[in-house]
Amino acid sequence: MRTVRSIGNAALAVWLALALTVARIAPIALMFALVAVPYRVAGTLVVIVGVVLVVHTVSAARAAVLDRGDHRALPDDGYVVQVAEEARAQGLPVPTVLHLEGRSDRAQDPVTIRGWRWCFVLTPAGVAPQDLVQQVGPDLRDGTARIRVLLWAFDLAVTDWRVVLRMMATPFRKGVRTDLRLYLFPLLLLSPLALIGYLTARVLGAVTGMLLPRRFRRAMPAPVSAGARAEPGTHDATLPEVGPSTPNWRRVPDLRPIESLLGPSARVIIALLVTFPGTYQGLGVLPAERTAWAWEEGPAWAEVVDVVHTEHSDGLLEQVGIRHNSTWRPQVALPNSSHVWLAEGTTQVDAGESIQVMSWTAMDGEHHRHPRQTSWTRYIVMSLLMLGASVGLSLPFATSLPTLLGLAGNIRLRRLDHDQRVLTGRRHRRRRPWSRLGTRFADLL
């Protein structure tokens, strides 16, 4: 039975990875396919699944715990130690234990969420340590706990497109402030991309819902912060007004509904303008240039008859001997005796040597390229820069909470995990996270 569930989880993980990728980058991938170089787009599509998994699930486990856990009521030290001893006795990874946010609408079961370096168990109060480990053991053994991270990241992607599309429709809603209408009207130019992303995510969400086993929905409570959403830009009569009473034309709006749009909007923008273009410029270059695609001819050897070399500064990297900006543009003699200029690249080429050339025909004529156009130093530098930028920008917006509260909760969650690791003798960092900075900020949640 466990083997069958493991195989099903593996198939579900593959589907969720592909669905998450399509839901995140479908609009920009379609646009690049129409306007960008075909082989570069193809190479980007080869590696984009791995990039999306790194960028958009790197903190998904912590975000899921942050949205579903009750950080005000923590389990006592004795309970945590008993859970750790019981988990070790059964050969299971020792989890960090937190309480589920209290709900009165239905009974709750313990939930396991496991990331790359994190393992959390969210449990209702009153569950004995032996019963807790007994209930979460199967999920830790067959990979169900890891699937929940992918499921959370995919659900968040679907929700983001719905929120962004509703935000773009805000100017046409009743009761919206005039200034907010003026701010949001320019965003209507991006509505085709938002509509494509929303429809794609909606279809993928429906298919995933049919493929999803019942045990995932039964044991994965919805995030607390997802409830009670108000229309952005509308006035809440329960809030006090600040400003002159007569005439009463200045109101301080409720910023919480507007701030709740920042996270979804930022995640969509990062995926469209950083994740995919960054992969196009970085990790996607290697498979793009080194692969002979179906629509191309070659590779064929051609002699270099002329080279245009352009020196560029490499900044600080030049001081350690890394050259990745200088370019060489070769002119080659094709087998039919015609001479063509290839695109400039960062791989050094000298006149008189023979290089491989790929050819393909498009509507604007015949094109040629060098399969080793980009040097290894350029490839590595651009890959690290683009991947680092994507991960760094996505971390503050990983949770569905408003940005500042999400950062505060993330800091406190790191501390709680560190404290339980020290208490149970698990591997941990030498210093408590944020021990000198952000103490009051992290205690907001």
Image (cartoon, rainbow, N blue to C red):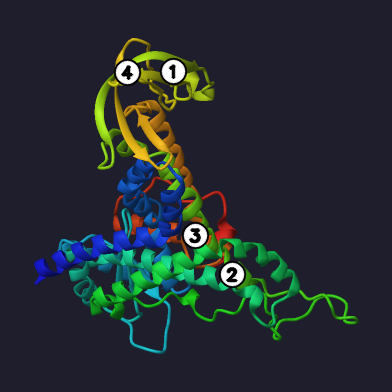
Mark identifier at residue 321: 1
Q: Quadrant of residue 251?
A: bottom right
Question: Of label 3 and label 1, which has the lower sequence position?
Answer: 3
Determine whether the residue tagged by mark 3 lies in a helix, strand or loop. Answer: helix
Question: Which amino acid, mark 1?
Answer: Gly
Is residue 198 shown above or below 388? Answer: below
Q: Is residue 269 left or right of residue 109?
A: right
Is residue 51 shown above or below 99? Answer: above
Identified at 56% across, 61% down, the residue is 190
The image position of residue 100, as x and y in percent, is 39, 76
The image position of residue 355, as x and y in percent, is 30, 20
For marks 3 and 4, give the CA distance.
49 Å
Q: Are marks 1 and 4 in contact (CB under 8 Å)?
A: no
Give the label, 4 or 2, closer to the camera: 4
Give the label, 3 or 1, closer to the camera: 3
Question: Which amino acid, mark 3?
Answer: Val
Give the label, 2 or 1, closer to the camera: 2
* Residue at which label 3 appears: 268
Give the label, 3 or 4, closer to the camera: 4
* Residue at which label 4 appears: 337
Determine whether the residue tagged by mark 2 lies in a helix, strand or loop. Answer: helix
Determine whether the residue tagged by mark 4 lies in a helix, strand or loop. Answer: loop
Question: Which quarter of the figure is the N terminus placed in?
Answer: bottom left
Question: Of label 3 and label 2, which has the lower sequence position?
Answer: 2
Question: Which amino acid, mark 4?
Answer: Ser
Q: Are marks 4 and 2 in contact (CB under 8 Å)?
A: no
For marks 2 and 1, give the CA distance.
49 Å
Q: Is any part of residue 345 visible from this angle?
A: yes
Q: How many numbered circles are shown?
A: 4
